[in-house]
Image (tube, rainbow, N blue to C red):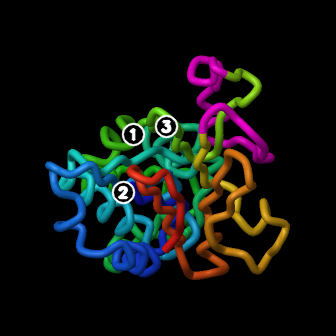
């Protein structure tokens, strides 16, 4: 069985709820099983616990090395840019809530004017010192994961490349593709990034959306729904579902 979820956006409670719906991970993700847990990116920004979400997913990957796949999303890539380059310090895409999730209250009290270059530099230094694994880990995250019949990716692939999609899809498309593509393709494409309600043209819909052909969209817009849908795929029957 494959379990896939995406776009957690700093919402730790919603992540834990999704994991609980899957079941006892120690029983499910055993090294001798074919069961897999796949995260499709965007672990930060939006909710108040971006740092805790990253730590939780990192811990899960370390614990279930043979069965857990963690992909990179565009927000995770932006965080990596923030930590490793100078320019994003000026045009940071992060809310104060996101950056402060990495800081204890005693440190937050020392910062004012969080948008200034000096304060952003100090926050970056603090994160680098107290989360020494973070940059290397974010760098190591792949952009996609494929099986014989599927590709799991944060935003999407270049379907126009047809059978050459793996070579023909740029990193930017895999991280930022918009608008999403629907319709038939050579393999199934499972993506997050765009809320399933937007793809379904129903703002009240926050579950896994299947386009009836080859595309599954699993971003449940957690900031609105407070829920992260989990796509399931039975590797024996080839049946998809959601929990």
Which secondary structure, mark 2?
A: loop
Q: Is residue 150 left or right of residue 106?
A: right
Q: Earlier in the sequence, mark 2 or mark 3?
A: 2
Q: With 216 as the anchor, is 48 left or right in this view?
A: left
Please check the rendered image and state whether residue 200 is part of the magenta-colored stretch, yes or no: no
Name the residue located 52 percent from the left edge and 59 percent from the top edge. Answer: 6
Identify the residue under disc 3.
Answer: 144
Specify start and end residues of the magenta stretch as a single range: 163-187
- Does 179 lie within the magenta span? yes
Residues 238 and 70: in front is 238
Q: Which residue is mark 1?
A: 141
Spatial CA distance of label 2 from label 3 is: 18 Å
Displayed quadrant of residue 170: top right
Q: Secondary structure at mark 3?
A: strand
Q: For the residue labelled by badge 1, is the local secondary structure a helix, a strand or a loop?
A: loop
* Residue at (31, 38) in percent of width and height: 136
Name the front one of labels 2 and 3.
Answer: 2
Q: Earlier in the sequence, mark 2 or mark 1?
A: 2
Alpha-carbon distance for marks 3 and 1?
A: 9 Å
The quadrant holding residue 210 is: bottom right
- Contact, mark 2 vs mark 1 (Cβ under 8 Å): no
Q: Is 178 situated left or right of 32 in this image? A: right
Q: Position of residue 110 (x, y in %)?
A: 40, 72
- Left or right: residue 6 versus residue 2 is right
Name the one closer to the observer, 11 or 158.
158
Residue under numbered circle 2: 1
Closer to the camera in the image, 232 or 140: 232
Q: Which residue is drawn at the image coordinates 50% and 49% (left, top)?
A: 76
């Amino acid at each position: 069985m494959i379990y896939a979820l995406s776009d957690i956006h700093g919402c730790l409670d919603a992540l834990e709820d999704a994991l609980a719906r899957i079941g006892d991970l120690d029983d499910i993700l055993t090294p001798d099983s074919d069961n897999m847990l796949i995260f499709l990116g965007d672990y930060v920004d939006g909710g108040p616990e971006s740092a805790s979400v990253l730590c939780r997913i990192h811990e899960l990957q370390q614990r279930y090395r043979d069965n857990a796949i963690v992909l990179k999303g565009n927000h995770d890539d932006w965080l990596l840019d923030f930590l490793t380059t100078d320019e994003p310090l000026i045009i940071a895409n992060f809310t104060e809530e996101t950056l402060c999730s990495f800081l204890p209250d005693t440190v937050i009290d020392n910062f004012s004017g969080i948008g200034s270059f000096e304060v952003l530099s100090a926050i970056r230094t603090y994160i680098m010192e107290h989360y020494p694994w973070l940059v290397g880990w974010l760098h190591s995250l792949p952009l996609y994961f494929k099986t014989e019949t599927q590709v799991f990716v944060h935003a999407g692939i270049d379907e126009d490349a047809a059978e050459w999609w793996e070579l023909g899809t740029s990193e930017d498309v895999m991280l930022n593709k918009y608008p999403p593509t629907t319709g038939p393709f050579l393999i199934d494409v499972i993506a997050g990034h765009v809320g399933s309600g937007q793809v379904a043209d129903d703002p009240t819909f926050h579950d896994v959306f299947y386009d009836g052909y080859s595309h599954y969209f699993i971003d449940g817009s957690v900031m609105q729904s407070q829920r992260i849908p989990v796509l399931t795929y039975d590797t024996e029957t080839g049946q998809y579902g959601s929990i």
